[in-house]
Image (cartoon, rainbow, N blue to C red):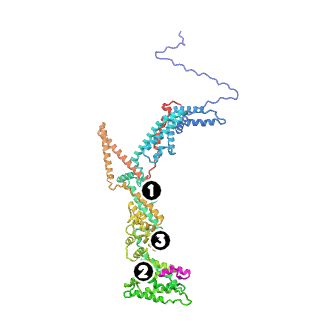
Amino acid sequence: MTDIRQPIPLPPGFVLEDEPQQPSQQTTPQLPGGFVLDAPPALESEGIRQGRSAAQGFADLATWGLADEAAAAVGTLGGMLPGGHGKGYSELLDEIRHTSEDDAKAYPKSHLAGQVLGAVGNASGMARGGLSLAANATQAGKGWFTRLLSGGADGGLQAAGYGFGSGEGVQDRMARAAYNFPLGAALGSGGELLATGIGAGSKALFRGSDDIAKGVNPAANVQTANEFGIPLSRAQATRSIPQSNIENQLRSQGSMSGFDAAQREALGESVNQVQRGLAGPNVPISSASSAYEAIPGRLRSVRDMTKAASKDAYKVIDDNDVLVSGEAVRSLPDFIRNRLTSDQILIDPMYHQGAARAMAYIDDYIGRLPKPSGDVKNIDAQLRWVESLRAGLRKNFPPIGQDAPALKAISGSVDQWMDDIFDNGLVSASDDVLDQLKTARSKWSDYMSIADPKLKQGRTFNPQYEAQRAVKAISEKDMSPEEIGQYLWGSSVASPKNMSFMTAQHLRKVLGPDSPEWSAVRQSFWLRATRAGDEALNPSQIAKNLDGLLNGQGKSVASTLFSDGERELMGKYLATMRMLSPAREGLNTSNTANRMLPQLQRYGTAIMGTLAGGGGLYGGLGPLEAMGVGALATGALKGAGALSRQAKTYTATRVPVPKMASGQGGVLLRAPGMPLLDDKRQGFLPAR
């Protein structure tokens, strides 16, 4: 009888598996009353450990390897508080490091990502805080070699700081810092070199030039131009020669046509804007010449009104109490003869009978004045009686014929004598009457300056004679508005006539500073400087005209025509016009190269497409496939060219102020390599 407990033989090559062992049944020990077992600690989820690993990596690189030590120090202080854990610094540091190492091994990608972010944040913060040599050099516009050395120094210092912070003890820290420095310097120099190359390529292909002429503030230029609503291109704002050449090429390809048209329209509107400011409450004139259409009539009207006002004010002489010193009256004949002698005017009774009779008339008239005698020390004459002498002289002895010069001199001497007696206080009357007489004399003087200006006023030369003569001429002669403007100021607004300053002052006085006619004169100067007909002049010509008017030969005229604020505004406009004018070095008058460039680019694109197709055919493609490759290459090159032109045009027209380089490019390219210096990953130094 066979024993069933015997194992059954198995075929060759087969074995029995071990029977699973049944876990031993463990009984829960009985605890004394009032005691319970603590629940086993809950296992941490993978998400928490993964996030902690990334955070530990970030803190490690962001704090130059000092994050674990800082955390242990804070934890030790917290454990010393009442109810704290009571663990020491070394115990906590070991726990933190073991936890960090375990998480890093379990989730290396998360840990590495955190380290990269920490390294980038550390370096970026240094750059933003002004502590990065490379960023400072970039922001200062230093050359590529300086930036390269500075980037190496930044990378070396960052790596050395991480090595120092991750070591133990002074000797180990110094060793790790010395080991890390050259590796970090290589990363820093490489990152800066790569950033410089990428930046240069991006500028060449898509941005244009970031060059700024010496002493130029693009932001201030754009702000000044914006006051007049005029947009600036980058070349105009920066005065950059390279950028000017780029924009010339874009113009030859038609890419800047929309911007140029908008700028021309804004220029024309800016001329009108300034003109409206000069006009104030008055109506803006339509053209420079139209300013002089109403001026002749206005001058005649002012002349007549001034004469009438003088006569009305002079009626006060009918007052018998207005007296003139008798001695002054008796000195009148001698005063006239002395004036004739000083002016070298001789009166020969044989040839100047009219002048001789006029002097005899004066002698006889003045001889009627009683002479003081006895107790009477002085006898004054009524001013009305003296005025009768002057009126009779002009009525009975008009300046005609060969006696005209002498008779004019006699009449002028009487007028001068009248001025002198008022100036010297030889006329006695009440204060109100004297004020009226002075007003009458002033208005009469104004009238004579318009109606009959004199080269000399008494014994002094009349400095405004030419101006008064010119104003009289335009009020009496039949002249067109264009002729009046040229007669007064000349043909050039930048270099007006020599007497334009005096003419402007006299015309301002006669017309009145607030009159519409004077406002029109002011506007005419602005329009002559900025417009030719209905069209605005080119910016270069406007700048030349305004410079001559404000700073050259027209400076004195401008000071009479315009206020300080208006001249300051025109100075800003002049600066804007200079911005719109290309720098001389960047002015391509022939434009031959720019016209040839599009054609050369088309030739180059066709050649590259042909070479691509030929390469495909040589590589074994069929004729149709090779043609397709050539067509794709040609299309890609055309698209790249169009994209480059569009990007450069956008930069030139929409970003006139180059953005200051922050130096963050080298930071972003060098910092991700810092985690490679971790000794746990490299293994070149012993683990701590």
Residue 490 placement: quadrant? bottom left
Q: In the rendered structure, does residue 418 fall within the stretch colored magenta?
A: yes
Viewer-nearest residue: 491 or 83: 491
Write down the residue under mark 2: 342
Q: Which amino acid does label 3 sit on?
A: Pro
Asked if labels 1 and 2 touch by Cβ distance under 8 angstroms, the answer is no
**Taking the image as drawn, is residue 669 in sight?**
no
Q: How crowded is mark 2: few (under 14 residues within 10 Å), some or many (20 or more)?
A: few
Q: Which of marks 3 and 1 is nearer the N terminus?
A: 1
Q: Where is residue 253 in the image (x, y as percent from the top left)?
A: 35, 52
Dot in front, 2 or 3: 2
How far is mark 2 from mark 3, CA to CA?
39 Å
Q: Which amino acid does label 2 sit on?
A: Ser
Look at the numbered disc 2 and give the secondary structure of its residue: helix
> Is 542 drawn above or below residue 471 in the view shown?
above
Write down the residue under mark 1: 221
